[in-house]
Image (cartoon, rainbow, N blue to C red):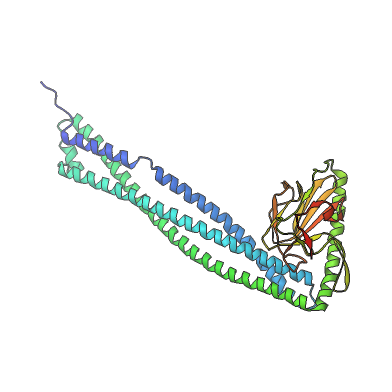
Amino acid sequence: MKKKRIFTRSTAFVLAIIMCACAFIFAPSDIKSVSASTIAEDKKAIQQKEDELARITKQRKEAQNALANLQSDQASMLQKKAAMDTQISTLTKEVAMLQSLIEDYEKQIVNTEAQIKTTQAQTDKTYEQFRMRVRSSYEEGLVSYAELVLSADSFSDFLSRMDIVGSLLDYDKNVVKKLTEQRKELEQSKAELQDLKRSTEQKNLEAKEQEASLVKAKADLESYIADIRSNMAMQTRLIKEAQAAEAEINAKLEQMLRDLAAKESASYVGGQFNWPVPVSYKRISSKFGWRVLNGVNDKHGGIDIPCPTGEKVMASNSGTVVVAEYHYSYGNYVLINHGGGYSTLYAHNSELLVSVGDVVSQGQVIAHAGNTGNSYGSHCHFEVRVNGERMDPMNYVTPPNGWYYS
């Protein structure tokens, strides 16, 4: 007797459906994994910047509080100028950080929208595949799992059909689970997208507010400088304050540099010292040595080269940064050790680009010129020191052609 076939045409068709559908549903999605990874990186970068913004905002508020406490006419003029400098510096950083965050938020919005589009397409495709299986089963007459099992011709056929039913049940269960997960992911991504848009709008408002505060802070500083210039008594008082502050920091730096020269074995790096700003700035507004300011004798420890705020300040020679900080007198300043007892100092900068321990090369941009500390017009104050003692920079530096003093 001819052996009866166990699998019917309908059974084979069901198996084909299961194999094709499962191959689609459980295939890896490169698009989704890349998008999720990108968004995770965006979130991490944004959180780091949010933390940095919080630190800068705290510094700005502290400077504003300090300034508010120094409004008395009897308050230290250098301390008041320092508080104004810090307020402007922190506001500038705060605005820059807010603008950077806005760019990151906008980037993450684009990536999140792309992820939503990808997930939606995958969900639609999974659902359509499921609908196709149900429709095909109906068209083939496989109305129910019970009918598929009860129509078996033999016990062996019954067992085979039970396996098929189990596969179909597993498939349906996995499809429903996958559709549920994708729907949850879509809802979460859409919620995150709305949060991102709200955060971007908030950061835009904050940026506009701080930009307005920065404009006002700069105007207040200009007004304060104008008041000093127009008031002889204020000028005299400021000069005496500045002399005391400069004497204190100079003694500290001289001792530090003498100690460093005594301990180090490195010889001078060699060569001439370069002009510390672009050579297009040829004018020296204040020479090295004694000068009379508002009737008060004052010794100037370097040369002043007027240049706009933000202009490049460059290392006059290669060496190692030994100081990079703010001081009432020097403002934001950098001190570089060139070996053999030689060092150079660059003061009144709006921004420092190097830190203590950095090894710099000749001509490297180390700061941006400014008007911080005991400075009332943007310029680069430049010093050359030998074993800590300030020397006339013009005996060491190569000035630009056509330089002049006025």
Which residue reaches farthest left?
A: 1
Residue 220, given in percent of the width and then of the height, sits at 68, 74
Q: Residue at coordinates 51% horizontally, 49% vertically from top-left?
A: 41
> In this rendering, does residue 57 appear at all?
no
For residue 148, which quarter of the picture? top left
Residue 230, given in percent of the width and then of the height, sits at 77, 78
Q: Residue at coordinates 70% horizontally, 58% vertically from top-left?
A: 280
Q: Is residue 332 above or below residue 72?
A: above
Residue 258, given in percent of the width and then of the height, sits at 88, 50
Residue nearer the viewer, 157 or 182: 182
Q: Is residue 359 left or right of residue 4?
A: right
Which residue reaches farthest front?
A: 402
Q: Quadrant of the N terminus?
A: top left
Q: Is residue 167 above or below residue 232?
A: above
For residue 299, which quarter of the picture? bottom right
Residue nearer the viewer, 247 or 347: 347
